[in-house]
Image (spheres, rainbow, N blue to C red):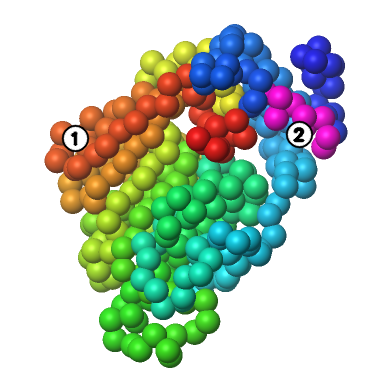
Amino acid sequence: FLAEMGKSSGELSEESWSEALNWTCCSLWRGDGVPISTRLLELVSRLMFRSVGLCTGRPEDFRRARWDLLTSSQMVAAGGDAIVAFSDVMVPGLTELGDYPPVPARVYSPVGVDEKDVLPVLLFFHGGGFCIQSAKAKSSHDLVYTLVKNLHCRAVSVEYRLAPEYPFPCGLRDAYTVLSWLHSQHKQQQHTDWKTFAKGQFPVKQLLLCGDSAGGNLALVLSMLTSQGLDPDNRQDPRGQSMREIIKHSALVYPALFEFKTASAQKEGMRYFLPKKMHEFYTKSYMGGDKRLLSDWRVAPLSSASFKGLPDISVISAELDPIRDENLLLIQRLQHEGVNVAHMQALHAPHGFLTLPSWASD
């Protein structure tokens, strides 16, 4: 099987790609969640990403691979089932701030809940290195669906713009636009009878920010912006303090923090599902080639002088993840500055494990 993958030279069919992904995710761990062989896991992940062109570092290969992944991945249409309903909306842009266009998003709600019922709201940002993935992709959708089902909350999953076509701060601006939209519904709730609300709107009283990988970065930076009363362009925003008051928690799943000098980042054998060239391409693309942004906390949060004033934070890290140690550095900083933080490390798990078929159900 591995030999056939190696001979494919970048031409895996849709069926073969799906087979390779599912076989890798489901067969390389024993029943107790321990990898059968970390060396085999490393080899298979490298072959997988090389076969679809995601780790060559060449923009033309990346764009083709991203299109192939989106078209071969199962995209979930709006709808629902007997447990969770979900629909697609277009969040109005913040034209008064500049380049803050309308943002597509998917809204989830437990079936049987009235639009006027007050539930916690999960604001979710998918991962993908700021360059790939979609709120409608099955892996992201299944994760949000599971959270809504188990937490009995509403959720809004954001289809933010992706690099390299839209580098920083485009994705962050989109995240802020959707946060502002939810905040406006919170403010309207305080002064308006719910019978006058437009269809698709709902009360927002408690907000949980959540994201995996790149999405974890966006969730953390949003918390930092609102705590300082700033917008994504580092300008004062009078809504900031009021936004901060409704954000009760941030859940960061192996958040990308752009800290490359840690031991786990330097260890080549840790790069399961996050090959070095691909990681470098994501970084360069999101920053638009401007390395100076590595010292900007809106991109690399660990460069911030302070984390004081943030809401409670939960961090999930993965043992076999090249960005594991930067996650641990974040936890140390948060604890040192008095932020209430909880941490769980998933043993024997690679980067991105929460959206892999063999882990999602757990």
For residue 18, the mark is: 2
Amino acid marked by disc 1? Gln
Closer to us: 281 or 342: 342
Instruction: Specify whether residue 20 is painted magenta.
Output: yes
Q: Earlier in the sequence, mark 2 or mark 1?
A: 2
| Callout 2 secondary element | helix
Residue 228 in the image: x percent, y percent?
Answer: 23, 57
Q: As drawn, is 118 to the left or to the right of 131?
A: left
Instruction: Specify whether residue 164 is painted magenta.
Output: no
Amino acid marked by disc 2? Ser
Disc 2 from disc 1: Cα separation: 41 Å
Residue 274 in the image: x percent, y percent?
Answer: 56, 27
Q: As drawn, is 361 to the left or to the right of 64?
A: left
- Whether residue 56 is visible to the viewer of this picture, yes or no, is no
Magenta-colored span: 14-24
- Which quadrant would residue 265 be assigned to in this image? top left
Q: Which residue is mark 1?
A: 335
Q: Main secondary structure of the magenta part?
A: helix
Closer to viewer: mark 2 or mark 1: 2
Report the residue at 54% width, 52% height from top: 145
Residue 38 in the image: x percent, y percent?
Answer: 56, 11
- Whether residue 179 is visible to the viewer of this picture, yes or no, is yes
